[in-house]
Image (cartoon, rainbow, N blue to C red):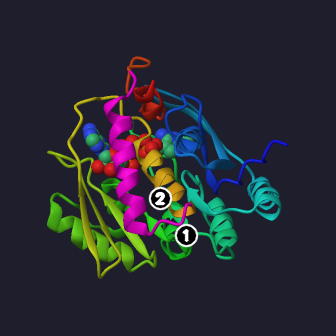
Amino acid sequence: MPIPPAVPPRVLTVAGSDSGGGAGIQADLKTMLALGVHGMSVLTAVTAQNSLGVQGAWELPAEAVRAQYRSVVDDMGVSAVKTGMLSSAALVETVAALLAATDAPVVVDPVGVSKHGDALLAAEALESVRTRLLPVATVATPNLDEVAQITGVTVTDEAGMRRAADRMLGHGPRWVVIKGGHLPGDPVDLLTDGSQEHWLRAPRHDNRHTHGTGCTLASAIACGLARGQDVPTAVRAAKAYVTGAIAAGFALGAGIGPVDHGWQLRNAR
Ligand SMILES: Nc1ncnc2c1ncn2[C@@H]1O[C@H](COP(=O)(O)OP(=O)(O)OP(=O)(O)O)[C@@H](O)[C@H]1O
Ligand SMILES: Cc1ncc(COP(=O)(O)O)c(N)n1
């Protein structure tokens, strides 16, 4: 008699679709497959997107977001959740209300603009991110542009990252990762809960094909939390995974190509 496989941890992404397959839902599900968990999705918006930018974006109704979430969570259960592009105040509030009732750890990537500067969140939704979404986050993972939008702090160095982290924690997430990928030099991220402080350093890969780094990092953190890792362990492992994915990023399209979510599989051949 074949032995039925054990049920893997289940990770849910609540995010937008990137037709180019480098960021958004597609990055999240690929990361989850690569890291050995069962990936599930609640789609918030559809984007027409490629290596050159975002050519169009269409949001789904709040009712469709709620229905997808209920279908998955009520039947299959969820070990961790990751949120990405939420597009509008209405969807931020819908998702925050759903997550307020879960016991699963929640990773919030407060996606504001794409790498090319296309808005993925309406400006008037920022207040809902501050007051509704961040309070339900186990870990929030803003980049420096998102930190500036949310807290008003412009970060230019590591002391600024610490100030920004304090301000972010004031909005209620248990932990915050301030992503320093946009500062010059080797990329350093600051992980803190206000008492512990972890500086995560990695070599900068001089590869312009970095589309999807933020989504990939946040999803990988959710995978570690779903496996029962503590936050520092999950974030360290996620940083190593995204660093490898950036090093192997593909020169696809005429602009910024996607990171390689399958880099570990290719290395293992
Ligand atoms: N060139 C690079 N080499 C190595 N690591 C990098 C590089 N660029 C960014 N990182 C790392 O990738 C992760 C994502 O950081 P980043 O600041 O790029 O996030 P993001 O801005 O949300 O992503 P994106 O720019 O794709 O929207 C962080 O851990 C960061 O330190
Ligand atoms: C649908 C969608 N969601 C998120 C991002 C941000 O991507 P990144 O991971 O590069 O910050 C994106 N470009 N498109």
Q: Quarter holding the N terminus?
A: top right
Magenta range is: 227-250
Q: Answer with mark 1 or mark 2, whichever residue precedes in sequence.
A: 2
Q: Residue 217 at x, y = what percent?
A: 42, 50
Q: Which residue is mark 2?
A: 110
Q: Which quadrant of the figure has residue 178?
A: bottom left
**Depth check, front residue: 137 or 221:** 221
Left or right: 196 in relation to 30: left
Which residue corresponds to the image point at 66% horizontal and 53% vertical from the top-left?
8
Residue 242 in view: yes
Residue 18: quarter of image = top right
Towards the viewer: 102 or 147: 102
Q: Is residue 26 magenta?
A: no
What mark, if any, has residue 242 been given in the picture? none
Q: Please provide percent x and percent y for residue 263.
A: 42, 31
Residue drawn at the location 78% of the way across and 53% of the way down: 64
Q: Are marks 1 and 2 in contact (CB under 8 Å)?
A: yes
Query: Element under label 2?
Result: loop
x then y, percent, for residue 257: 41, 26
Q: Residue 239 in magenta?
A: yes
- In the rendered image, is residue 260 in sight? no
Q: Relative to the observer, which residue lies in front, 244 or 68?
A: 244
Vertical comparison of 33 with 97: above or below: above
Three-letter amino acid code at disc 1?
Answer: Leu
Q: Which residue is mark 1?
A: 133
Residue 234 lies left or right of residue 74; in this view the side is: left
